[in-house]
């Protein structure tokens, strides 16, 4: 059955919105949209084409009759293409760790919380993009750190780990770093700019 | 129509420039302009900022400094709470303060549809007015803000723009052209205008008509709001863009290889768009660098003035 939308008298973007609604909600495969202005004619045609409809146009009585029929092959190949993209992850979350403990108060508790935090990070899923360690945070990346195995696992999962070189040098532990890439402030600032979300710990 | 004039009128209606300019003394001229429109965003405070930035822009585009302003308000007081109007006016005031402009008065009428804007007066030295048509062959063209706000505003109206897109485009439209205007003062800029309702091509057309030269635009260099491309492909192009296209198509030669969404963006009506600067080509790179250093990250050299063509040519 053909779905019909009479969008005469409506100005942009209303005809496109009504068409979009029918196409997406009712999965219409055949559709006819009647519009009465050139902008709406071009916009609705464009929208239907973006959804893989073949569009034919007839003009009568100062109106345009746009008939769209879905091009099955095109639409199917599009669905496969979307499925083929693995984890099309749109968001990038960066976590900035500026200390070796979580929060202030009891130091022992703070250290435990930090390990628990790092262990739980993988729950963020594919949106977790980068971990940046600065100041005392760099101590978490050295040989005798309890967090080391957790961080190595995260790195193996493809999480990018950046460790502040100036901080390692200042604390005299440059040669003890066991995980991640030594970095500078420019890289850190660029990462902040690229990230969709920066979480400070 | 015949318009009254006198010897002190430097830029008037006949010139169809961004604003009128009238000489007061040999060292001082005033720039006068007025602009108001219906809301483009839902947030009244941001709408006030955008409307004010848009109205102030014409003074900057003429090479001047805005000094005083008056509010123009049309408000449906029976349907809307006065607190909305208050937020709009507060938004406008923030931009006037940023511009160093004094609000000296205003006028409001009851109207079915909300509208807000400013009448602005600015100062300029009569010898340093930046008109549209003073193109020189070989000049480079620089655009200071990305294009696509009309298409995004259509998507906002349709409820299809994300919160992030709305926020970033709102901030872009509320951005004054003040810093850009201050920067270009230091360079050999021959002509300038701001991009608004006629879209990039419409304003280019005004520049070239009667100038004796043509303009070549490299579409790949155009700064474009990324989401505008997606929305254009979805058919969210405002009717104004089609009108602009019909009006200027005859003097535009677009290479068929230019992406269709980019073609829409060339004609997309802009709200509070950037400055389009025509600068001596040897200075273009340093001017661009300084604009970027001052925060105009999207600014780009988009084309050149050519003595060999008399229209607008768009290539990839």
Image (spheres, rainbow, N blue to C red):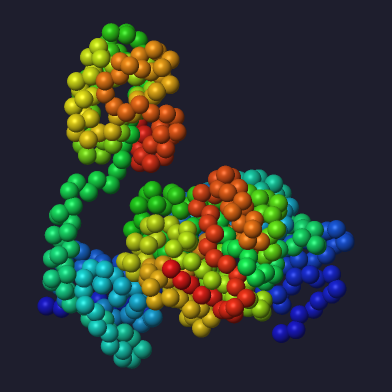
Residue under the point 23% across and 68% down: A51
Report whether residue A141 is seen: yes
Q: Is residue B137 left or right of residue A167?
A: right
Q: Residue furthest right?
A: B26
Above or below residue B88? Residue B234 is below
The tally of labels here is 0
Residue under the image location 31 percent in, 40 percent down: A92
Q: Position of residue B188 (x, y in %)?
A: 70, 58
Residue B88 x %, y %: 55, 51
Q: Looking at this view, is A18 or B33 the one in front?
A: B33
- Asked whether, in this view, residue B263 is left or right of residue A30, the answer is right
Q: Position of residue B43 (x, y in %)?
A: 47, 51
Quadrant assignment for the C terminus of chain B: bottom left
Work out whether residue B296 or residue A174 is closer to the camera in this orientation and state it. A174
> Which corner quadrant of the image does residue B28 belong to?
bottom right
The percent position of residue B308, horizontal first and vertical second, equals 59, 78
Q: Residue at x 62, y 68 (%)?
A: B138
Q: Is residue B92 visible?
A: no
Up/down of A171 relative to A77, above or below:
above
Instruction: Report whether B159 appears left or right of B214.
Output: left
Task: Out of A122 and B197, give the one closest to the viewer.
Answer: A122
Q: Nearer the viewer, residue B1 or B152?
A: B152
Q: Quadrant of the N terminus of chain B?
A: bottom right
Query: Which residue is rendered at x = 46% and y = 56% of the image?
Result: B41
Viewed as shown, does residue A8 lie left or right of B35?
Answer: left
Give the vertical position of A89 relative to A24 (above or below).
above
């Amino acid at each position: 059955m053909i779905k019909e939308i009479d969008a005469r008298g409506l100005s942009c973007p209303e005809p496109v919105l009504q068409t979009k609604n029918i196409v997406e909600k009712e999965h219409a495969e055949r559709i006819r949209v009647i519009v009465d202005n050139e902008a709406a004619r071009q916009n609705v045609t464009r929208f239907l084409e973006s959804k893989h409809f073949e569009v034919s146009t007839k003009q009568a009585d100062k109106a345009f009759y746009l008939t769209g029929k879905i091009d099955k092959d095109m639409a199917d190949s599009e669905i496969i293409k979307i499925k083929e993209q693995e984890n099309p992850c749109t968001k990038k979350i960066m976590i900035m760790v500026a200390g070796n403990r979580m929060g202030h108060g009891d130091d022992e508790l703070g250290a435990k919380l930090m390990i628990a935090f790092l262990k739980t990070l993988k729950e963020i899923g594919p949106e977790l993009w980068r971990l940046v360690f600065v100041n005392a945070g760099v101590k978490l990346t050295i040989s005798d750190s309890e967090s080391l195995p957790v961080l190595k696992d995260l790195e193996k999962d493809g999480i990018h780990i950046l460790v502040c070189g100036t901080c390692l040098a200042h604390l005299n532990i440059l040669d003890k770093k066991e995980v991640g890439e030594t970095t500078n402030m420019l890289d850190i600032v660029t990462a902040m700019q690229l990230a969709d979300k920066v979480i400070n710990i | 129509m015949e318009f009254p004039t006198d010897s002190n009128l430097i830029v008037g209606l006949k010139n169809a420039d961004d604003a009128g300019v009238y000489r007061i003394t040999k060292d001082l001229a005033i720039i006068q302009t007025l602009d108001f429109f219906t809301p483009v965003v839902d947030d009244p405070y941001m709408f006030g900022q955008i409307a004010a930035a848009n109205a102030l822009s014409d003074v900057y585009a003429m090479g001047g400094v805005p000094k005083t302003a008056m509010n123009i308000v049309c408000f449906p007081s029976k349907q809307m709470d006065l607190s909305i109007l208050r937020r709009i006016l507060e938004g406008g005031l923030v931009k006037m303060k940023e511009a160093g402009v004094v609000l000296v008065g205003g006028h409001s009428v009851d109207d079915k549809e909300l509208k807000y804007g400013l009448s602005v007066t600015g100062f300029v030295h009569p010898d340093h007015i930046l008109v549209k048509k003073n193109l020189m062959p070989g000049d480079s063209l620089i655009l200071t803000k990305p294009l696509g706000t009309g298409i995004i505003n259509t998507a906002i109206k349709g409820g299809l723009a994300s919160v992030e897109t709305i926020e970033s485009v709102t901030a872009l439209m509320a951005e004054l052209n003040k810093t850009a205007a201050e920067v270009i003062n230091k360079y050999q800029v021959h002509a300038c205008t701001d991009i608004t309702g006629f879209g990039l091509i419409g304003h280019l057309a005004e520049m070239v008509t009667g100038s004796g030269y043509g303009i070549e635009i490299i579409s790949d260099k155009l700064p474009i709001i990324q989401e505008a491309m997606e929305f254009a492909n979805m058919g969210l192009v405002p009717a104004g863009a089609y009108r602009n296209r019909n009006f200027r198509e005859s003097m535009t030669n677009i290479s068929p290889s230019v992406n269709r969404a980019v073609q829409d963006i060339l004609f997309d009506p802009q709200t509070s768009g950037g400055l389009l600067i025509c600068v001596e080509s040897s200075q273009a790179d340093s001017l661009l660098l300084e604009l970027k250093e001052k925060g105009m990250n999207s600014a780009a050299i988009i084309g050149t003035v050519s003595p060999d063509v008399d229209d607008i040519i768009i290539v990839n």
